[in-house]
Image (tube, rainbow, N blue to C red):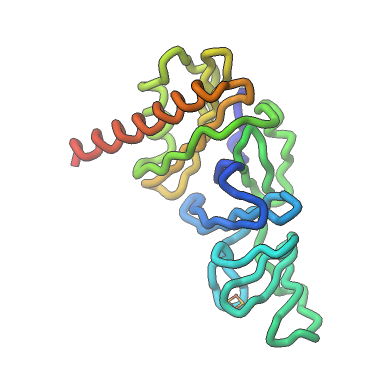
Amino acid sequence: MTAPSLWIPVALSADIEAGTSAGTLVNGEERVVWRDEKGAIHVWEDRCPHRGMRMSFGFVRGDHIACLYHGWRYDTGGQCRYIPAHPDLDVPQTIKVPTFAATERAGVVWMAPDGADATDLSTLPETAEPVRSLFLDMPAAAALAAVTTALPESYSVSATSASTVTLQGNGTTVLIAAQTRDAERSALHMTVTDNADTNARRNLALWATDLRNRIEARSMEAA
Ligand code: FES
């Protein structure tokens, strides 16, 4: 299975619970990933149009997110709907947070330019179980390369794309999706197909921790 380069992985689905938000960095830009209380996922620019407070510090209430600073409230389209200091104001349409296309596939949250076609992700399994995310001080391509040189026991690479490596082993499929945080930092989001038992998931999580330790040890040696 492969993932098209238009879609960028930004989090494990399991890490963004309903009614919560989290800030992340994508290609050097701050983004907020949030899930409304109905369960729909959203990825926006992480900046309130009022005075620039991070939206990821805000509060999710139902299908709105409210800025921490002065409480301006935005609907799921990014449109500001309510300003507490001016409760009767018909809020101008121009007060809007820039939004992105957001979807979930294979246990990962993906973002793309607004209007992108989510069917592009249809080669990935619909759902998967989380293994873990690794946050690394290295470019995404180097992080994916490190994965392929230290595969978990009994797994082999079955597919690669610019942002993913897929492994097969033990009757399961593991997806490792790389997020470029900036030129020097990346995150690897790892999931495994639903048929993996607890033991297999635990072993994969241990392998991921070991991978990070080895990468860190290597960069300390190089420093
Ligand atoms: S900065 Fe967000 S409401 Fe003022």
Residue 9 is situated, as x and y percent measured from the top left of the image, at 56, 41
- Camera sees residue 96: yes
- Camera sees residue 163: no
What residue appears at the point 59 percent right and 42 percent down from the top-left corner? 14
What residue appears at the point 72 percent right and 50 percent down from the top-left corner? 40
* Front one among 100 and 66: 66
In this rendering, the answer to whether 83 lies above or below 42 is below
Quadrant of residue 206 within the rendered picture: top left
Rendered-image quadrant of the N terminus: top right
Residue 50 is situated, as x and y percent measured from the top left of the image, at 61, 77
Residue 63 is situated, as x and y percent measured from the top left of the image, at 75, 61
* Front one among 131 and 89: 131
* Front one among 211 and 14: 14
Residue 92 is situated, as x and y percent measured from the top left of the image, at 76, 78
What residue appears at the point 61 percent right and 42 percent down from the top-left corner? 13
What residue appears at the point 51 percent right and 58 percent down from the top-left corner? 30
Rendered-image quadrant of the C terminus: top left
User: Whereabouts is ligand 1, in terms of quadrant?
Assistant: bottom right
